[in-house]
Amino acid sequence: MVCVGRDSFAHKLYHQYYSIVMKVLAVLFLGLAASSFAFSRSSRKIPGGGRIIGGQDAAEGQFPYQIVLLHAGSYICSGSILASNVVITAAHCVVGVPPRNLQIIAGELDRASVSGHEQTVQVVRIVVHESYGVPSDLANDIALLFLSDTVPLVLNEFVQPIALPIQEQQTSGEIIISGWGITTPSGSLSNILQWVELPVVDDATCQGNYPEEVILPSMLCAGFPQGGRDSCQGDDGGPLVSVNTGYLAGLISWGYGCALPGRPGVSTEVSYFVNWINDQMTS
């Protein structure tokens, strides 16, 4: 074997080649990141969720408040209807994105087919929480999307707003999460809306599950100790709904991996932002 010295001509050629390859890979990585947005919850802490893992197909009209969020015509996240012209989602789904690039589809069940219940509306204004990312990554992970006033959503059996909790209402018991995200950690997005029921995990237990992170009071954790059912890449911004009362308890935000034992999904707890939501909707 021939050893190549540090200052040899071959060594310099190697480093030039390596530098070019790394620059090409960086460009490819940035392009992929720009196209995938929130699809990044593979080994968390990272945003997200994809088709629900361990869930089942939804029925037509089962979740009339849920929407598909599109960026330049491609699926990026989910969200929930608050009014005919307002949708709520996770801030990390839309931060830095021009409103003109975003549309929502309400009344959707199967993304691969048209039922006739779908309504597509343009986003005209985005309001990201002013403290998003403070004091930690994905803190205050909440945003409102204001839709076109000239062509708002038409509310009907398949398109309905969801109720909000009262300010700082504490959620316990069971919640339902739903989305079009991936159904296995290495799978692809689901065409049919999926849902699963999970138990809420109290803040102290959740903090013990995430010793490397800070679980804020404004975060809500849910999942089974043994894992197996969870949100994953593509479910970002989607709803957690209280089984007992039917209000919007959370917005899918982040976690480590998907459906792993001892790593519950972490969402934005909507009750801590009710006053902020109402202020933005009436300002």
Image: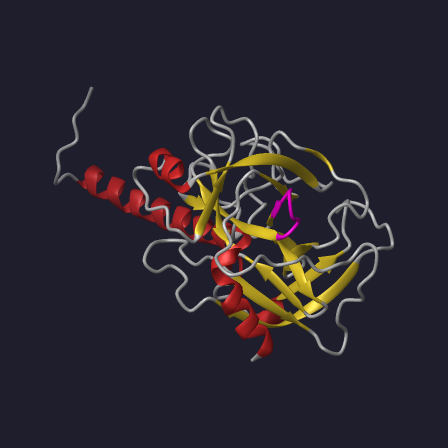
Residue 175 lies, in percent from the top left, at 60, 41
Question: Which residue does the image show at 54% across and 73% down from the upper left?
Answer: 280
Question: Which residue does the image show at 36% across and 44% down from the upper left?
Answer: 21
Residue 218 lies, in percent from the top left, at 43, 53
* Residue 188, quarter of the rendered image: top right
The answer to whether residue 244 is magenta is yes
Does 196 appear above or below 131? above
Left or right for 148, reference 273: right
Does 105 appear above or below 220? below
Question: Which residue does the image show at 15% across and 38% down from the upper left?
Answer: 8
Does 165 appear above or below 192? below
Q: Quadrant of the C terminus?
A: bottom right
Query: For the magenta stretch, what is the residue range?
Result: 241-247
Residue 88 lies, in percent from the top left, at 59, 61
* Residue 262, quarter of the rendered image: top left
Question: Which residue does the image show at 67% across and 38% down from the upper left?
Answer: 195
Residue 100 lies, in percent from the top left, at 62, 71
